[in-house]
Image (cartoon, rainbow, N blue to C red):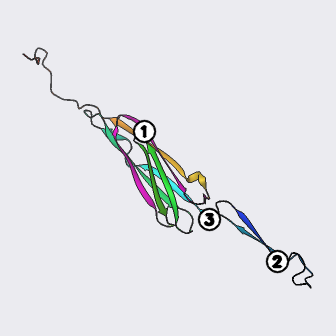
């Protein structure tokens, strides 16, 4: 098993000087082996599919979507990883196997966005071992939802004509 932190194993032979009895040099009877954690280097990026997101003048909400990509910058063995994406619709957690040279992608969608600015964050971590460069394991993006103006009609208005609705 590969440790999560650096470990040293010390192996010694004939440290008592009696086996064999003619052992004269004890200095070369020790071997130290250093076992380092696997050097996994995951990176996450997040980009809006559309920004800003326009909604119709007569609509109350729109749909925002962000594209999340995880890549490997090392050439090691496949490792299990966990991707967590958080946005206005809550948190989405995905477990997957990260393979060097193969990007892992997913989308975060929220379809009840009212006009305003929304932040979506993503972070990825190996579930075994440590990441060699944690600085690029987190990313975020902002998506703005804007409401379009009502259409302007070119119909001239008559000053003395008006309509009323009523009920009986």
Residue lying farthest to the left in this orientation: 168
Residue 53 to residue 38: above or below: above
Viewer-nearest of discs 3 and 2: 2
Viewer-nearest of discs 1 and 3: 3
The number of discs equals: 3
Residue 38 percent coordinates (x, y): 62, 65
Of helix, strand and loop, which mostly describes the magenta segment?
strand
Q: CA distance from mark 1 to mark 3?
A: 36 Å
Q: Given contact means CB atoms under 8 Å apart, are the residues at marks 3 and 2 in contact? A: no
Viewer-nearest of discs 1 and 2: 2
Residue drawn at 57 percent across, 60 percent down: 128
Residue that carries the numbered disc 2 in the rendered image: 13
Q: Is residue 164 left or right of residue 62?
A: left
First in sequence, mark 1 or 2: give its number.
2
Q: Is residue 104 magenta?
A: yes
Q: CA distance from mark 1 to mark 2?
A: 64 Å
Observer-nearest of 19 and 83: 19
Residue that carries the numbered disc 1 in the rendered image: 118
Residue range (magenta): 103-131
């Amino acid at each position: 098993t590969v440790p999560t932190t650096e470990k040293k194993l010390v192996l010694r032979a004939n440290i008592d000087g009696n086996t064999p009895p003619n052992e004269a040099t004890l200095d070369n009877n020790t071997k130290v082996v250093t076992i380092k954690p696997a050097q996994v280097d995951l990176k996450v990026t997040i980009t809006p599919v559309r920004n800003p997101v326009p909604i119709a003048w007569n609509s109350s909400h729109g749909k925002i979507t962000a594209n999340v990509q995880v890549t490997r910058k090392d050439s090691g063995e496949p490792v299990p990883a966990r991707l967590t994406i958080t946005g206005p619709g809550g948190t989405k957690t995905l477990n997957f196997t990260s393979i060097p040279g193969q990007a892992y992608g997913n989308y975060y969608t929220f379809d009840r966005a009212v006009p305003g600015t929304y932040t979506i964050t993503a972070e990825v971590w190996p579930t075994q071992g440590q990441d060699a460069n944690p600085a690029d394991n987190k990313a975020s993006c902002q998506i703005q939802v804007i409401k379009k103006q009502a259409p302007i009609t070119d119909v001239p208005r008559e000053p003395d004509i008006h309509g009323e609705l009523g009920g009986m």
